[in-house]
Amino acid sequence: MKAVESLGLPAWVGLYVRRWLAVEAVAADGRTIARDRGTPQGGLVSPVLADLFLHDAFDSWMSAGIVRFGSRTITA
């Protein structure tokens, strides 16, 4: 959540991300399972958080002149 809040997005984005991360998982037999960390597998929030992280991280990497391709690091 700290990373999402540091992006300066509208408050409603943080509200929805917080809710997505706190929602209980539903098992195949209908039981609800409380979660205390991570994102649900196959959940909608996983790619959204990845996009938000990569948006910020990619800008940082480019401004530092560091690009990684697989196991190789290329500096500009």
Image (cartoon, rainbow, N blue to C red):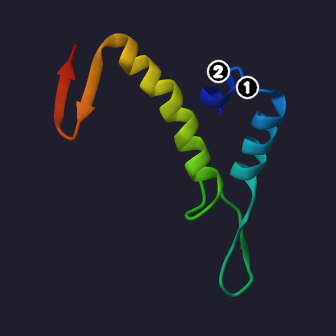
User: Looking at the image, which is closer to me, 46 or 76?
Assistant: 76
Per the image, label 2 sits on a secondary structure element best described as: helix
Residue 63: give x, y in percent of width and height. Answer: 39, 12
Residue ID for mark 1 = 9
Q: Residues within 10 Å of mark 1 (few under 14, many from 20)?
A: few
4 shown above or below 31: above
37 shown above or below 10: below
- Mark sitting on residue 20: none
Nearer the observer: mark 1 or 2; the answer is 1
Distance between the alpha carbons at the discs numbered 1 and 2: 8 Å
Residue ID for mark 2 = 6
Residue 20 seen from this side: yes
Residue 38 seen from this side: no
User: Looking at the image, which is closer to me, 13 or 1?
Assistant: 13
Residue 65: give x, y in percent of width and height. Answer: 30, 14
- The quadrant in which residue 5 appears is top right
Of the 4 image quadrants, the one containing the N terminus is top right
Q: Amino acid at mark 2?
A: Ser
* Residue 74 in the figure: left or right of residue 25: left
Q: Residues within 10 Å of mark 2 (few under 14, many from 20)?
A: few
User: Looking at the image, which is closer to me, 1 or 49?
Assistant: 49
46 shown above or below 4: below
Residue 10: give x, y in percent of width and height. Answer: 80, 27
Residue located 19% across and 27% down the image: 73
Q: Amino acid at mark 1?
A: Leu
Residue located 60% across and 60% down the image: 40
